[in-house]
Amino acid sequence: DGAAAEEFAAGDPYVAEGIVESWTVREWSAVAGSLLQHVPPPPRFPSYEWQRFADDVAVPAGLEVELPLDGRPGRARIPPCWQLDVWVDEACGFWRGEVRRETTVGELRSLAARHAGCSSEAVTLRLDGAPLDDDA
């Protein structure tokens, strides 16, 4: 709300005495004081391609990481082959599937169905509650 800022500026002695002849109130955001220490770094989106990262960046668990000792920046990537671990239920336990860059959701769904002993039509893989497309 710019009303408080306008009221403050109108009561300012430099404005009241005509020293400041014009001014503008604009909306903006700032982080100051101790809040600055708690601002998380921008999110990193893992990739199968090597990505450089600064010393102060938290690297997500499970990535392949290189930390050169010669002063070059570190870099990280999704390993070429990794294991997806999913808790299904008490009866089925964990389902584990090998994943590569070219693995599709449809292939993972078929593996999960085989593990659960049901048809792949009975299995829905979801991310954050949304069903995943088999071709993705």
Image: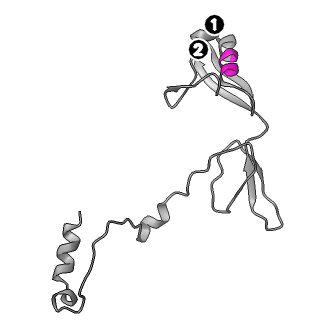
Q: Amino acid at mark 1?
A: Ser
Q: Which mark is residue 131?
A: none
Q: Amino acid at mark 2?
A: Val
Q: Which residue is mark 1?
A: 119
Please provide percent x and percent y for residue 128: 51, 32
Please provide percent x and percent y for residue 23: 26, 80
Q: Is residue 54 magenta?
A: no
52 over 114 or under it: above or below: below
Asked which quadrant contains residue 120, the reply is top right
What are the residue bounds of the magenta stretch? Answer: 106-111
Distance between mark 2 and mark 1 Cα atoms: 7 Å
Please provide percent x and percent y for residue 21: 23, 87
124 over 59 or under it: above or below: above
Please provide percent x and percent y for residue 131: 53, 24
Q: Secondary structure at mark 2?
A: loop
Image quarter where the C terminus lies is top right
Q: Residue at x 20, y 73 (%)?
A: 6
Tell me whether the residue at label 2 lies in contact with that at label 1, contact meaning CB atoms closer than 8 angstroms. yes
Q: Residue furthest right?
A: 70
Asked which quadrant contains residue 46, the reply is top right
Q: Residue at x 59, y 19 (%)?
A: 88
Q: As drawn, is 71 to the left or to the right of 125? A: right
Q: Which residue is mark 2?
A: 123
Q: Secondary structure at mark 1?
A: loop
Q: Residue at x 66, y 20 (%)?
A: 106
> What is the chief secondary structure element of the magenta stretch?
helix
Image quarter where the N terminus lies is bottom left
